[in-house]
Amino acid sequence: MRAPSRALAAQWTTAVPVVAVVALIFSWGRELPVFAVVLVALCLAGAVLAAVHHAEVIAHRVGEPFGSLVLAVAVTVIEVALIVTLMADGGSKYSSLARDTVFAAVMITCNGIVGLSLLVGAVRRGFAVFNAEGSGTALSAVAALSTLTLVLPRFTKKPGPEFSGPQLAFAAIASLCLYGLFVAVQTVRHRDYFLPVTQEGEIQDEEGHAPPPGRRAALLSLALLLVALIAVVGNAKAISPTLESGVEAAGLPHAVVGVVIALLVLLPETLAAVRAARRDRVQTSLNLGLGSAMASIGLTIPAIALASIWLTGPLLLGLGATHMVLLALTLVVGALTIVPGRATLMQGGIHLAIFAAFVFLAVSP
């Protein structure tokens, strides 16, 4: 029965991304009726599941931490392209889009994904075990990047929550350099810090349950992963006008739309992180969560800084007081969670509570 089930999985994970892209082509730039929105949403959900499958195939082929890095960077690159496109088309209407998207990504990854992964890992074994050196390195990079790019603009001499030209250039270069340095540390110099560990503290360098896929299968999964991620981001954008209309009809803040879209875009990483935690590979889950937060800042800010050369309107990056409090709370709690190298249900619950507060304050600021 296993061979037919694997063949069936290969068929649907190959077909669904293609179907989702076709749906994207026919829906892009059009006002969709309700039934079309439902179909696009179903295609988006299928593309998410397919993306998770192909990300796991690649991760099994190349091993950790390269596998989680591939998914985090692929999602972020496509997300950055979407942000730049919207800012180029929308002008001053989207002047805070980069800030809102990056902050939402940090909250979703550092609290939603991390909290859910710790909760799942602790439920199975009593406590979730991970490598404090690797996770601490990742969290410190997130702290530095988020403070330099999202907090500092509020305290410069330039009026408003934005950088001057030279300040923006410095923030972009610093973000790119820090992210590049982290990738080098994660994949070369201290790769063992980012490998999953057992309950006894031993490093798990291999999955150990099945032979890795061949080179051809891995390359096919890489291509289909990119197709699926394009479909996820594109279809999320396609249904965003309907979401925006619903939000406005309900009298909710406009920022809710950005939160919903960010949740949809980061859904593949969330599912992949939870599945890794269920296999007692919590470090892989943390690699996905914290790595995605870093990629979102380290790639988005340089791209936006470059695009600002021809974009019109201000580029608002500085967070408001409420969001700065949430960011500070996230970083402090994250440090206390990571230092021991293992976490219980309590730590997972705390992170999820902070994430719930972020979502609630987005709805009711």
Image (tube, rainbow, N blue to C red):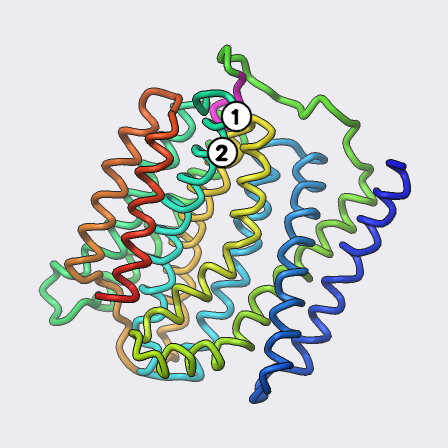
Mark 1: which amino acid? Answer: Arg
Q: How many marks?
A: 2
Give the SS element for disc 1.
Answer: helix
Q: Are the residues tagged 1 and 2 within 8 Å (C-beta)? A: yes
Q: Which mark is residue 124?
A: 1
Task: Specify the label residue 208 is tagged with.
Answer: none
Q: Nearer the viewer, residue 195 or 53?
A: 53
Q: Classify 313 as above or below 110.
A: below
Question: Which is nearer the eye, 285 or 64?
Answer: 285
Q: Residue at x 63, y 81 (%)?
A: 35
- Residue drawn at x 69%, y 34% is 60
Helix, strand or loop for disc 2: helix
The residue furthest top is 200
Relative to 269, residue 66 above or below: above
Magenta stretch: residue 46 in it? no
**Quadrant showing the C terminus:** bottom left
* Quadrant in which the N terminus appears: top right
Residue 120, numbered label: 2
Q: Which residues are magenta?
A: 191-198
- Residue 332 image offset from top left, x and y in percent: 23, 37
Q: Judge whether 69 appears above or below 95 on screen.
A: above
- Indicate whether residue 192 is drawn in magenta: yes
Q: Nearer the viewer, residue 45 or 30?
A: 45
Residue 96's place in the image compared with 195, above or below, is: below
- Left or right of 307 in this view: 71: right
Looking at the image, residue 23 sits to the left or right of residue 326; the answer is right
